[in-house]
Amino acid sequence: MTFARIRALIFVAVLFVTAGVVVVMAMLRDTQTGPTETALCPAGAVPANIKPPDRRSDVKINVFNGTPAVGIAQKVGNDFKNREFVVGKMENAPGNKIYDEVAVIRYGPKAVGAGWYLRAYFLDEAVTDFDIKRKDDEVDIIIGTQFQQLATTTEVNQSIAAIGTPILPPGTCEA
């Protein structure tokens, strides 16, 4: 074996040892093993999921008709299904109440990010209604009398950019 090959092998061995030392030091000095985010919440605050969904199929919605017209919940619910959302109920608003908005988006702490994301489908003209006591991860959408149609993909993307990132509702902390 030539001197050049021995020198190259020594160099490679030194690199392996150095890499091993760096990995061990990184593992020993890791600070991510502290308390979870939930444990860092102030007393009385409810953990909220403000992370927008990665995929539309991660969002569970119920669509309610808050107009006097017949079949609006089914029409809009099917539009959401065609856009790959998970749609549960499609029925009249509770008490057959009429809503004079574009839409009302209701959600709890587990669906803050999803509720924020769904605002874009109404071009940020929907009224949001956060219920801190709600335990599920579903979003209820009540279609109002001013509703015309869901936004196109391009309009949704532009609206998401304009809306920005979700904000923690009062009484919550980031989960």
Image: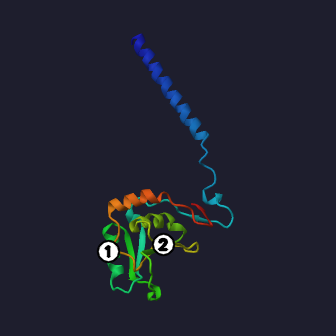
- Identified at 35% across, 85% down, the residue is 69
Amino acid on which the number 2 mark rests in the picture: Val
- Identified at 51% across, 66% down, the residue is 112
* The N terminus - image quarter: top left
Mark 2–mark 1 Cα distance, whole angstroms, equals 21 Å
Amino acid on which the number 1 mark rests in the picture: Asn
Total numbered labels: 2
Label 1 crowd bin: few (<14), some (14–19), many (20+), radius 10 Å: some
Q: Secondary structure at mark 2?
A: strand
Q: Which residue corresponds to mark 2? A: 127
Tell which residue pokes out farthest to the top in this image.
Answer: 3
Vertical relation: 46 (above or below) 104:
above
| Nearest to the observer: residue 8 or residue 39 | 39
Q: Position of residue 87 (x, y in %)?
A: 38, 73
Vertical relation: 133 (above or below) 12:
below
Describe the colour scheme in one phrase. rainbow
| Nearest to the observer: residue 53 or residue 165 | 165
Can you tell which quarter of the image residue 21 is in? top right
Vertical relation: 87 (above or below) 28:
below
Q: Which is more N-terminal, label 1 or label 2?
A: 1
Q: Position of residue 44 (x, y in %)?
A: 67, 67
Q: Which residue corresponds to mark 1? A: 78
Tell which residue pokes out farthest to the right in this image.
Answer: 43
* The C terminus - image quarter: bottom right
Say left or right for 60 vs 35.
Answer: left
Vertical relation: 25 (above or below) 143:
above
Q: Secondary structure at mark 1?
A: helix
Q: Position of residue 98 (x, y in %)?
A: 44, 85
Q: Which mark is residue 124?
A: none
